[in-house]
């Protein structure tokens, strides 16, 4: 077991492990640690193990490993190997969800908190909601083109952000596709209704939502700005290119057959 000491250190450690011939590399931590370790394993024969210790554990929950309990350690010892898709956005890897708009703004604020967790996330979201201004985006995927004002654009590999908050209830990590969800607008008036839909897998029932599914998306906006990848913040250009890498990561999941 090696402790990380700085940003990107987990990625360095995982790359060294692969170079040294390690067959299994285990990420113990939140989505940021998972992202760094998994990025080093994409396209290799090494298998990712996961002991999720973050505030949301979105990918872990999707894969059937929701908590750092005995079942997580049983999965490391006795789990089966599953090949899953991964994504890139302007060359930056992501494994669970990436996003633009309010999504990225909240990730930026959340990463600056000294204490995290679900309650902190809700407080941060409500505080930012009062002052956020919508942007207009041009989204293209194959022959489909959509120009829309958006509060959030999320591109998901799994079905949820974490904490069973389902931004893409139909998403699968092994279908060779990514699921894009647009929340067109949000305010204090409709926030509670949106939250209810997110936590009950019913986001698709709202007229405030647009959804696309595809292997590649191009998103244009007026100017450069923030995006997030699995909760980590990046500055990118006005054009955002997102693509799936099918079956590119081998991961340990519980021995029982997965349902997602």
Image (cartoon, grey):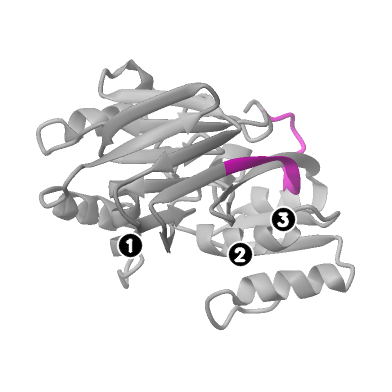
Q: Along the horizontal axis of the image, is 179 left or right of 184?
A: right
Q: Which residue is mark 3?
A: 49
Give the residue pinned by disc 2. Answer: 36
Q: Nearer the viewer, mark 2 or mark 3?
A: 2
- State the residue at coordinates (76%, 63%): 25
> Looking at the rendering, which quadrant does residue 184 occupy?
top left
- Kindly give the residue lying farthest to the bottom in the view shown: 5
Mark pair 2, 3: CA separation: 13 Å
Tell me which residue sits at (18%, 54%) in the image. Answer: 128
Residue 250 to residue 155: above or below: below
Rendered image: mark on residue 108 = 1
Secondary element at image label 3: strand
Q: Earlier in the sequence, mark 2 or mark 3?
A: 2
The residue furthest right is: 21
Q: What is the span of residues highlighted in magenta in the rendered image?
A: 243-258
Spatial separation of the CA atoms under disc 1 and disc 2: 18 Å
* Dominant SS type (magenta): strand
Residue drawn 52% across the image and 26% down it: 213
Inspect this view and state whether residue 250 appears. yes
Choose between 219 and 227: the one closer to the eye: 219
Instruction: Report if residue 217 lies within the magenta region.
Output: no
Q: Quadrant of residue 186?
A: top left
Residue 241, image x, y percentages: 52, 46
Locate the C terminus and report the quarter of the image it occupies: top right
User: Is residue 227 left or right of 72 when viewed as pictured?
Assistant: left
Give the tally of numbered discs. 3
């Amino acid at each position: 077991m090696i402790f990380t000491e700085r940003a990107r250190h987990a990625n360095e450690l995982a790359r060294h492990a692969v170079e040294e011939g390690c067959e299994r590399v285990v990420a113990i931590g939140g989505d940021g640690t998972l992202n760094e370790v998994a990025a080093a394993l994409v396209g290799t024969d090494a298998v990712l193990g996961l002991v999720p210790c973050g505030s949301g554990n979105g990918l872990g929950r999707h894969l059937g490993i929701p908590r750092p309990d005995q079942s997580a350690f049983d999965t490391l010892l006795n789990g089966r190997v599953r090949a899953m898709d991964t994504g890139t956005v302007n060359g930056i890897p992501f494994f669970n969800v990436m996003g633009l708009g309010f999504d990225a703004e909240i990730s930026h604020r959340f990463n600056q908190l000294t204490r995290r967790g679900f309650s902190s996330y809700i407080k941060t979201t409500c505080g930012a909601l009062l002052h956020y201004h919508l942007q207009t985006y041009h989204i293209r995927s194959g022959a489909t083109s959509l120009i829309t004002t958006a509060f959030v654009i999320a591109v998901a590999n799994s079905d949820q952000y974490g904490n069973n908050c389902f931004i893409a209830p139909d998403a699968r990590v092994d279908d060779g596709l990514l699921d894009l969800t647009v929340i067109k607008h949000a305010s204090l008036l409709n926030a509670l209704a949106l939250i209810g839909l997110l936590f009950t897998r019913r986001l698709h029932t709202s007229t405030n939502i647009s959804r696309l599914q595809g292997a590649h998306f191009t998103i244009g906006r007026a100017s450069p700005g923030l995006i997030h990848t699995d909760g980590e913040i990046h500055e990118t250009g006005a054009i955002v290119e997102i693509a799936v890498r099918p079956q590119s990561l081998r991961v340990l999941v519980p021995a029982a057959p997965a349902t997602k």
